Amino acid sequence: MKWEKLKPPEPDDPMCCCECDIYQSGCCCDCEDLDEAFNRWLKDKPPKCQSPVFGALIDNLEISMIPVLVLLPLLLQVAALHYLLGVIILTALPGLVLWYYYATHRKKRRTLFFLTLALYSLAYMYYLFITEILPRGDVNQLQVCTVTAGMIFTVVSLIHTKRGPGFVTTTLPEAHSESQEPKKDSPQLNGFIQSEVSSSGLVGESQTVKKALTAKWSRCPVCKITRPPRAGHCRTCGSCIQRLDHHCIWINSCVGQANHRSFLLTLSVFMLTSLYGISLVLCSLCPRQYLMTSLFYCPGVYSQSSTALCFTCAWYSSIITGGLLYLLVVQVLNISFNVTERETQLALRNKTGQSRLCGLVIDTGEYSRGFYQNWVEFLTMADASVSPRSSVTDLV
């Protein structure tokens, strides 16, 4: 156990979107045994429903979901009592979330804690919008339909993102070689391949082409399979992912070639829906204030518990939106420079990249072909083959 804690990370290990290796405090209690006992108790109960979605939920239930469902509305209710309590709780909430994660899930592979927090926050904000803001009469039906459509589109896009990042399979190298191997009478051979073909015949042609096609392919020391360029091994998922970007704990899945576009779409739709919803709430609570200043100054908002709770939730949503806005900006910049988050971490580790735009992006210069061509490549890249392991369980 001590060796696993002290050993350096593998070169292919991607950095999680909020993973930090400087956390060395070991004084927190470890509730892994309690979590495993709770999981066994749930799985030993006889199923009452044959639905595959319900079965997947039961199989993936964790005790870490309970504090999210209980503490989040409780903390928001306490924060709505006074603006000083709101400042203290909303400031300490990100640190409390990270502390709870490190205290209970340091040794776990995958966890539903952050996915539960994200989905429950989304559902709770929408519930307060329908029950508290809509009855005030300041929001029309078109605006309600817009927010509802944004919510539905966000969930649908998240489900599509969760269907799989594109796993590297053992048959991928053979399929790639067969699809890229030229025909016997093909005249489109250049460079040294053409000279080799002319001197060695068809046998030399086949061997040379296969060597040229697999020159940049590497072998994973963990999975023991040959993987294409830009693929990486995720230690959290335990698999190699095609064009691995990072493992996102907020969706409990990797972001790779198959779901990178849908992941970016999910972020964009959520950002637009969240900003629009926050603006509607502030315009309803503070009609005499400007939109940009109402979040900081809204007199009389703490006179009623319902308006104070909605105002506190608007601040909570703004904090989450600000964090995801940073993630979206980093993703857009990485795509513009044609670099993944994994390649960024490797470049920083090996000191081979150049920092651009005040450190927001690391330019490796290996795959970049210009702003326009980089976006064309990202938007038109072929979807990776879906692994047979992608099922209803992966959606949870």
Image (tube, helix red, strand yellow):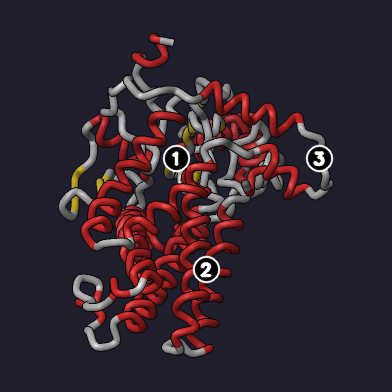
Amino acid type at image mark 3: Pro
* Left or right placement of residue 8 versus residue 106 in this view: left
- Checking the image for residue 230, the label placed there is 1
Residue marked by disc 3: 47
Dot 1, how many residues are within 10 Å of its Cα: few (below 14), some (14-19), or many (20+)?
A: many
Q: Earlier in the sequence, mark 2 or mark 3?
A: 3
For the point 51% across and 88% down, the residue is 142
In-image side of 355 versus 144 (left or right): left
SS category of the residue bearing label 3: loop
The answer for how far apart the CA atoms under marks 2 and 1 are is 42 Å
Residue linked to disc 2: 127
Give whichever of 77, 235 is nearer the camera.
77
Label 2–label 3 contact, CB within 8 A? no
Q: Is residue 121 above or below residue 175?
A: below
Quick check: 197 left or right of 27? right
Secondary structure at badge 1 equals loop
What whole-number distance in Å separates the C-alpha atoms at marks 1 and 3? 42 Å
Kind of residue at badge 2: Tyr
Other residues around mark 3 within 10 Å, as few (<14) / some (14–19) / many (≥20): few
Q: Is residue 286 above or below residue 269?
A: below
Compared with residue 33, is residue 268 higher up or lower down, i.e. above or below?
below
Q: Residue at x 53, y 35 (%)?
A: 110
Marks 2 and 3, Cα distance to the nearest angstrom? 30 Å
365 or 244: nearer the viewer: 244
Comes first in the chain, label 1 or label 3: 3
Crowding at dot 2, Cα within 10 Å, few <14 / some 14-19 / many 20+, comes out as few
Viewer-nearest of labels 1 and 3? 3
- On the question of residue 333 being in view, the answer is no
